[in-house]
Each structure stands twice: as structure tokens, then as C-alpha cells.
Amino acid sequence: MRKILLKIAYDGSMYYGWQRQNNFITVQQRVEEALSRLMKEDICVRGSSRTDTGVHALGQGAVFDGNFTIPTDRIPYALNSFLPPDIVCRGAREVDNGFHPQYSVINKTYRYRILNEEFPNPLLSKYTDFIPYSLNIDHMRRACDYFIGKKDFKAFCASGSTAKTTEREIFSLTAEKKDNIIDITVTGSGFLYNMVRIIAGTLVYVGLGKIKPEDIESIIAGKDRTQAGKTLAPGGLTLMNIVYDFSGNGE
């Protein structure tokens, strides 16, 4: 029995998130269907991150087990011939039996992209959130510093979360503007339900002057969701990369 870790990219616009659900088409479902056709056996995959409806990915991780002879480096090429064009396998590696797609994660990186100009751009509408108002990028950058570290991010968790604890660690958070595009990029140990989209919405409030950069500290301490910014739309969010602990593979 072999265990393979896939690196999956997808445009999430047409899917009801990553995780398989009854009565809705998801990315996991399409990947499992393609793998089952390729391997000629029923294949189930376990993902590293449960991206929501409309969220995109460049570096989603998915693990599956099976008895097959296809060389690992050829799996992406073979699998892509069975996948729809908005889902692409960008890599594969064999891992030890002890590897887990979630528990072996060291960190995840997400990017939230904002189109900040007067009019919408139809060529970017699926991958950005449109904000036509002037945003103070310097204030947004200053606010980023208050998120760094291990903290209780209850104020940045949407209702409906099943997380046992709201404590997470953020390793880096940046807000950068190039031309009319603002990229908010965050790396952390893990994220709560809608956490990145709420952080991005809070930084937008800072940019608009509704929240001062130094207010972030008290918002985190207060653990009150109503004090943070709004949850931005899913289309601006992309799971960029996941770093794993492969120590069980002798590395």
C-alpha cells in the first residue's frame, strides 16, 4: 500500500468548497472521481485545509492510499487528464504511513487580494474583492504587527466554528500594494473559520480609518467578534502554500 501527497490548485468559483458534501459539487469530490478512474479502484482523499465555497488554492494538500504501479512523478500528468480544467494537480510525493495531511502541517499561507480602484475589473472579479474607496496602506501595514504571535483569535472567528480552541499562532502578516492591487498575506500554524477573511476585513477598516492600527490589540484581547471588521468575500482568498513535517520520511 502506497501513500501519496498531492499538491492541488483550483479555481473555487464553481465549487461548494473543498470538503465533500451531500447535494453539492466540491473539489474533493472531483479529485476523488478522477483518481478512482485513473487508479481503477475507489479512492478517498484527505485534504489539509477545508477551504470554503468560492475560495481558491494554489497549494492545497491531499493524501490518498492505494495499490498502483504508476511512478509518483507521473501521477500529476496522468491525473490531470481526468480532472476538469479548473482543478490541476501540480505535484506528488510518496510519504510514510505516519504522515497526516493535517497533523503533519507546520504552517499554512493564505493571500487575500483586493482590487482598490474606482471601477471593477471583470477580468479580476473572480479572484479579488473590489473596494473603490481610498485605503491607507501605511496604517494597514502598522496594524499587521499586532496580529503576530500566539494569541486567542476568538474575535476573528465566525459563528458556526467547531474548533476546540480559538488560540492560533500567526508567524507573519503583510499588506502590500502594487498599482491598484493590495495583497494581504498571512502565514500561521492554522486558522479558524473565516479567520483570514475577517483579518482582511479588519485591515480594510483600518485602511478606511474606522479602526486605528493600535486598536487591534484591544480587539484581540476583547474576544468580541462584533469589534473586528466584516468578513470579506471568499473570491479574494487563495490558499497559497502548506509546509509539512516530513521527518517521518527520514528528512
Image (cartoon, rainbow, N blue to C red):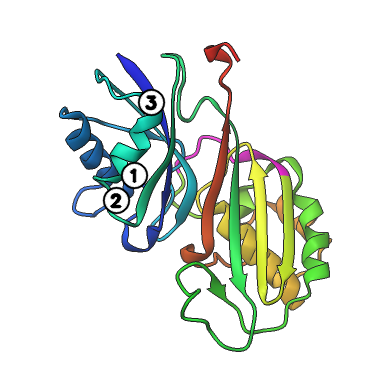
Mark 2 vs 1: CB contact within 8 A: yes
Q: Is residue 244 above or below residue 226?
A: above
Determine whether label 1 and label 3 are within 8 Å by CB. Answer: no
Question: Which residue is disc 3 drawn over?
Answer: 72
Disc 1 is placed on an element classified as loop
Toward the viewer: 142 or 106?
A: 106
Residue 156 sits in which quadrant?
bottom right
Instruction: Say what amino acid the circle numbered 3 marks.
Output: Thr
- Of the residues under marks 1 and 3, which one precedes in the sequence? 1
Mark 2 vs mark 3, foreground winner is 3
Badge 3 marks a residue whose secondary structure is: helix
| x and y, in percent, of residue 79 in the image | 29, 39
Label 1 crowd (10 A; few <14 / some 14-19 / many >=20): many
Q: Nearer the viewer, mark 1 or mark 3?
A: 3
Q: Residue tagged by mark 2?
A: 26
What range of the chain is rendered magenta? 162-171
How far is mark 2 from mark 3, CA to CA? 25 Å
The dot on residue 90 is none
Q: CA distance from mark 2 to mark 1?
A: 6 Å
- Within 10 Å of disc 2 (Cα), the crowding (few <14, some 14-19, many 20+) is many
Q: Is 167 contained in the magenta span?
A: yes
Label 1: which residue?
19
User: Looking at the image, is 197 positioned above or below residue 18?
Assistant: below
- At 38% from the left and 25% from the top, the residue drawn is 72
Depth check: 228 or 126 in front? 126
